[in-house]
Image (spheres, rainbow, N blue to C red):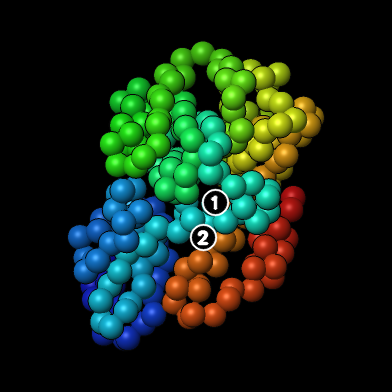
Amino acid sequence: ALKPAMAGLRAFNMKGINLTIPHKIEVLNYLDEIAPDAQLMGAVNTVRVENGKLIGENTDGKGFLRSLRDDAGMDPSGNHVVILGAGGAARAIAVELALAGAEQITIVNRTADRGGALADLINQKTNVKAIFHHWTDVYALPGITDILVNATSIGLFPDVEAKPNIQYDTITSQMVVCDVIPNPPRTLFLAEAEGRGANTLDGLGMLVYQGAIGFEMWTGQKAPVAAMHQALANVFDR
């Protein structure tokens, strides 16, 4: 069903579409061009039509980066990053943070082959050093950590009592601690980090900005970010 839908984009002269699971990888087969960062990630969540060409983009990592800069006031350039998880969100975030000049990225994941593959990708395709840590036990953050990202689904509604298996007393007030989960916005993971004085960033911003960036690609207009954020906050405010 995806192939005719993509043909329909051209036929109806549409500006573009947003895609989600399970279409993010299959769509690569039906595009004329793929943006370099989306190519690295091996996944597309946004398609824009330009002069009859279907161009694949990935705004997930871009959305996270914009939220990190605008909402948390933190630029990844020169900073040490730890990412929990190695799925689609982790991949998108790792690639964008590497392209934005992070000093070092540590991938912490339970599945060794998946986590190792992501670290290899960053090492081989960007100028950033990546390290893989096999997450078999409670994980203690290195003291040099500047940015910690939970890119797993641990703590996602309805499993709100769950939190990633890390040593929470290794979080310091010097760190920016981020969660990609938008529902609930204040996860137990973020509450723990907040209690240790860290600057925290919830997943609402990433969700809003990934859509806003797509909107801007299609329309050339600034997206109504504040209204989008409020609408999502209303939905997830339980």
The answer to the question of whether label 1 and label 2 lie on touching residues, with beta carbons closer than 8 A, is: yes
Of marks 1 and 2, which one's residue comes earlier in the chain? Answer: 1
Q: Residues within 10 Å of mark 2 (few under 14, many from 20)?
A: many
Task: Specify the label residue 95 is tagged with.
Answer: none
Quarter of the view holding residue 45: bottom left
- 67, 174: nearer the viewer: 174
Q: Is residue 216 visible?
A: yes
Q: Position of residue 49 (x, y in %)?
A: 33, 77
Up the image or down, 106 lies above or below 65; here it is: above
Up the image or down, 117 lies above or below 225; here it is: above
Q: Is residue 124 left or right of residue 237?
A: left
Q: Residue at x 51, y 60 (%)?
A: 210
Q: Is residue 85 visible?
A: no
The residue singled out by tag 2 in the image is 210
Dot 1 falls on a residue whose secondary structure is helix
If the image is split into quadrants, where does the N terminus sit? bottom left
Q: Position of residue 128 (x, y in %)?
A: 40, 37
Q: Residue at x 74, y 53 (%)?
A: 237
The residue singled out by tag 1 in the image is 64
